[in-house]
Image (cartoon, helix red, strand yellow):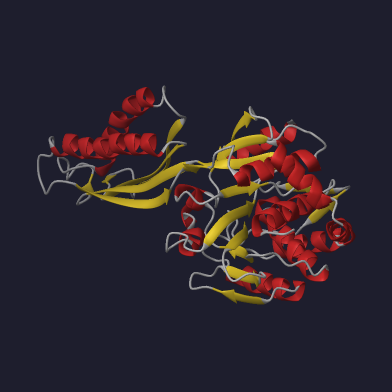
Amino acid sequence: MRFLLTLALAFGFQFAALSQSIQPTYKAQVSTLSQKPEIRKAFHYIETIDSETIRDMIMLTEIPAPTFLEANKAKVYADMLRAAGADSVWMDEVGNVIALRKGKSKGGKIIVDAHLDTVFPLETDVTVKQRGDTLFAPGITDANRSLSLVVALVKTLHKNNIRTDKDIWFTGTVGEEGLGDLKGMKHLFRDGGKGIDAFIAIDGGGLEDIVNGGIGSLRYKITFHGPGGHSYGAFGIGNPHNALAQAVAAFIPKADAFTKEGPKTTYSVSVLGGGTSVNSIPFESWMLVDMRSESQERLQGINKLFLESVEEGLRKENSIVRSGNPLTVSIDKVGDRPSGLASPDSPLIQQVIAAADFMTGGKNPELSAASTNSNVPLSMGIPAVTIGRGGEGGGAHSLDEWFVNREGYKAAQQALLIVLMQAGYK
C-alpha cells in the first residue's frame, strides 16, 4: 500500500478498484498460453537473466538523459537491442529507437515501449548506489527499469525462437517527460497510427497497476510585455506584473468553481518570472500554467476560462495606463497531451487484467488514469495500455529514487504474456 501511495503522489495516478470481473475467455487464454512448454521455458529464461537485466538497468540509469538530450542513451540502448537479437534496429527523425522483431504474417504490428528521458538536469549525479538490497539513483525506476525490461523481452523472444504472427516494434521514445510533450509518441503516431494494432507501454509500478486512461493536459507560457522603466521616473506606464496578477486573480475563482464538479480537472500556476530590480518597472512578466483532466471536454472548458482570464488581465492593466504604449501578451502553448480511455471490457485490457491476475496469484488489479505515452494512441481510439515494471520502488522524480528487485522478473514474464496475446501466438 505504501508503494501505491508513493506512485500516486509521484505520477498523479487516479487509482480505482477494478469493479468488473475478468471474462472467462481471457482467463483461459492466459492459462493455456502459460502452460505451453516453450513459454514455461521462456519464463525460466527470464529468471536466469534477471541479474543481466539489473546490470542493463544500472548501465542505462548512469547515462544522463534529460528531455531533449536523450541521444547518448539512445545509442547505447540501440546497441543493447541489437545484441539482444532484434532483427533490425534504427533511430527515427526525432531520436526514437526502434527495434523490429519480424512476425510470421505480412500484416499488422504492435509496439512495446519505454521512454528514454528523465526529469533531471544533465549535471545531476546519476551514479547508482546500493544500500542493502536497495538501489538508489535519479531515474532508476522512471524509466530505466522499464527500458531494461524491453531489452529482456527481446532477449527472451530471440533465445527461445518465439515468433509471433504480427511484427513487434520495441521502442525507446524521446520526450515523454514534462515539456517533451510526448514528442516521440506524436511522431510515431503522426499518420494517425496507420498499421499499429496495439500499443503497450512499460512505465509505472507493480504488476497489478494498469493504466487504461490518459489524463490530458494543456500547458502554457504566458508573457506580458511592456516598455519597462524606472519605478518612479516612468510611473504610469503599463506594468506586466500587474497584468499577470490580474489574470491569475480573474482565473482562480472561475477555475475553482469549474473543477468542483464533473470528471477530475486540475489547474496550477506553476512557475513565475520577470523583472530586474526593486526600483524598475519590469518589461516582461511570465508564468507557466498546467491544466489537466480525464475528460477532453472538461479540459477544453477550463482552457477557455484560462484564456479569457489572460485577456481580462491585459485589459484591466491597460485601462489604467497613463503614458506609453499599451501592454501586449504572448500566449505560447508548451504542452498539449490528449486524453483517452480504453474500455475495461476491451480485449487488450481484459488480457492485461487476466495476465496480472495470473501473475499475482489473484491480487486485485487496479485500473487507473495517468499521463503516459499511452495518451496518444488512446486519444486515437487505438488499443493501448501502460503496465508496471515490477519490483518495488519509490521517490520517482526525486534525487532519492529507489528500486528493490523483489521478484522483478515477474514483470517481464507478465509483459511476455501480454505481448504474445496481442501479437498473435498459438
Q: Is 245 drawn above or below residue 103 in the view shown? A: above
Give left or right: position of 421 versus 375.
right
312 or 392, nearer to the observer: 392
Quarter of the picture holding the C terminus: bottom right
Q: Where is residue 395 in the image (x, y as percent from the top left)?
A: 68, 43
**Residue at (64% x, 68% y) in the render:** 73
Residue 77, percent across and down?
67, 69
Give coordinates of residue 255: x percent, y percent: 35, 28
| Left or right for 342, reference 223 | right
Q: Quadrant of residue 361?
A: top right
Total numbered labels placed on residues in the image: 0
Question: Could you tell me which residue is drawn at 53 percent across and 61 percent down?
Answer: 196
Q: Can residue 349 be seen in this view?
A: yes
Q: Nearer the viewer, residue 64 or 210?
A: 210
Locate the N terminus by quadrant: top right
| Residue 320 rendering spot, x and y as whole percentages | 13, 35
The residue that appears at 47% across and 48% down in the rendered structure is: 381
Q: In this view, does 34 lie to the left or right of 99?
A: right
Quadrant of the image occupied by residue 51: bottom right
Q: Can residue 391 be seen in this view?
A: no
Q: Which residue lies furthest to the left in this view?
A: 323
127, 299: nearer the viewer: 299
Given residues 181 and 120, the one toward you in this image is 181
